[in-house]
């Protein structure tokens, strides 16, 4: 059987490596695994969204094909959501497309903008889909390492002059970084002078612990250079429902619409209606969730305090991005936590070379599991430098 080279050379889904290790541990009889590697919200989708779906399934219009770029009701609701929450005006006709979640938004956007060999720049560490999507477009994937000392922000003067597309993600998975509006303005100035497009992945909107991340589209000139990708997965506990959208520059949106209609066709109308109910709600649910995640952050903090280890407190998103003790690589330390404490974490190098030296711990796990994991780390004194003996 011939398999396309495009697929054979796709970067491996590194998350599967963790799944394999977990499966091995479970097969060996371990019954007490705690998985802090998760990126899937642990809570239920709110009832009002589920109710909206139930009602919408009955509607005849939703049982057939819907519009390729999203139902009118969804595009209008998205425009209202951006106006109410970010004071950004969007034309539902030309500046928005609904997609099956941020991953589809990313793959469609990158493939609509990038020709083979064109340079796609990301800050490293990065969400792995950026690399895979660039690979599919045959782009030149160019990660640039970012440092804790610079709040994990890519320095604007380090963006290569021959960049074709810059991918940003704040709040950041995995670092938890948040970008000030001035940073976006500086990026826009660079994009205008060096003539590159900007895509901002806003999958963790509304998940800031000190302050909320502004929208990229709030920065002046943003719509001239780029788009923002929004997802309902994390904010409304809707990861399995597959709904998101891309908004911003009309020329980019027109290109994505053309590509999207061929590759992804359309979103189930009832899912779209349910997402509309989320977007037009009073936004009490994301606020309530934020308090739940903040409580979990505090449990991690108390645990690290007991361990005598300084915690790298995230500014946003749903992970703790923690340096590993001296002497370990990310993967060695993750393996140690799995074998000694039966706690799975994501090794930082899964998010690019810039993630080496870190592990990622999830906030999408119950309070009790986080407390139990931290207790196990303390009981076995695992967060200490590797012994050289
Ligand atoms: C940075 C980032 N972008 C995009 C996604 C994917 O979101 P969606 O479920 O909307 O495809 C995730 C999911 O974890 C993410 O962390």
Image (tube, helix red, strand yellow):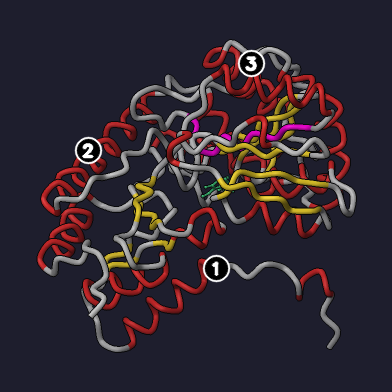
Quarter of image, res 368:
bottom left
Q: Give 272 or 82, whichever is nearer the viewer.
A: 82
Residue 118: x %, y % from top left: 85, 48
The residue under label 3 is 219
Q: Residue furthest front?
A: 389
Mark 3 neighbour density, 10 Å: few (under 14) some (14–19) many (20 or more)? some
User: Is 113 placed left or right of 104 in the picture?
Assistant: right
From the top left corner, tell me how far across and down residue 14 is, in percent: 54, 68
Q: Is residue 243 above or below residue 187?
A: below
Q: Residue at x 75, y 72 (%)?
A: 9
Residue 154 versus residue 133 in the image, above or below: above
CA–CA distance between discs 1 and 2? 29 Å
Q: Nearer the viewer, mark 1 or mark 2?
A: 1
Secondary structure of residue under mark 3: loop
Q: Which label's residue is closer to the chain start, 1 or 2?
A: 1
Please tell me which of labels 3 and 1 falls first in the chain.
1
| Tag 3 and tag 1, C-beta contact below 8 Å | no
Q: Disc 2 marks which residue?
A: 295
Q: Which residue is mark 1?
A: 14
In the figure, residue 102 lies in which quadrant?
A: top right
Query: What stretch of residues is rendered in magenta?
Result: 197-205
Q: Decide which of tag 3 and tag 2 comes sooner along the chain.
A: 3
Percent x, y of residue 88: 63, 13
Q: Of helix, strand and loop, which one carries label 1?
A: loop
Q: Could one spot residue 51 in this view of the protein?
A: no
- Compared to residue 125, the image places residue 234 above or below, namely above
Q: For the stretch drawn in magenta, what is the main secondary structure? A: strand
């Amino acid at each position: 059987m011939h398999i396309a080279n495009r697929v054979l050379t796709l970067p491996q889904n590194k998350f599967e490596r963790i799944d394999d290790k977990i499966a091995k541990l479970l097969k060996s009889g371990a019954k007490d695994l705690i998985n802090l590697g998760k990126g899937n919200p642990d809570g239920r989708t709110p009832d009002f969204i589920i109710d909206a779906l139930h009602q919408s399934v009955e509607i005849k219009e939703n049982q057939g094909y819907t519009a390729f770029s999203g139902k009118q009701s969804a595009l209008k609701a998205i425009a209202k959501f951006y106006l109410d929450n970010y004071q950004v005006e969007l034309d539902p006709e030309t500046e928005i497309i609904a997609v099956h979640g941020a991953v589809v938004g990313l793959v469609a956007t990158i493939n609509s903008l990038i020709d083979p060999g064109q340079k796609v720049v990301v800050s490293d560490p990065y969400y792995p889909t950026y690399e895979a999507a660039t690979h599919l477009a045959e782009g030149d994937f160019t990660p640039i390492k970012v440092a804790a000392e610079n709040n994990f922000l890519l320095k604007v003067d380090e963006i290569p002059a021959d960049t074709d597309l810059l991918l940003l993600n704040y709040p950041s998975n995995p670092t938890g970084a948040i970008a000030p509006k001035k940073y976006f303005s500086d990026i826009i100035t660079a994009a205008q002078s060096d003539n590159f497009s900007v895509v901002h992945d806003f999958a963790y909107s509304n998940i800031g612990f000190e302050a909320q991340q502004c929208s990229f589209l709030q920065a002046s000139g943003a719509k001239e250079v780029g788009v923002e990708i929004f997802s309902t997965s994390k904010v409304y506990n809707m990861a399995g429902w597959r709904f998101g959208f891309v908004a911003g520059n009309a020329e980019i949106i027109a290109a994505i619409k053309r590509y999207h209609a061929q590759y992804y066709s359309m979103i189930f109308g009832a899912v779209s209606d349910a997402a509309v109910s989320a977007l037009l709600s009073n936004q009490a649910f994301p606020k309530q969730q934020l308090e739940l995640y903040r409580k979990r952050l505090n449990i991690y903090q108390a645990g690290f305090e007991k361990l005598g280890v300084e915690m790298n407190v995230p500014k946003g998103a749903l992970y703790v991005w923690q340096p590993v003790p001296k002497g370990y690589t990310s993967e060695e330390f993750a393996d140690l936590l799995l074998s000694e404490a039966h706690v799975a974490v994501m090794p930082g190098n899964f998010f690019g070379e810039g993630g080496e030296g870190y592990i990622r711990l999830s906030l999408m796990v119950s309070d009790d599991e986080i407390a139990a994991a931290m207790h196990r780390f303390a009981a076995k004194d695992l967060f200490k430098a590797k012994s050289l003996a």
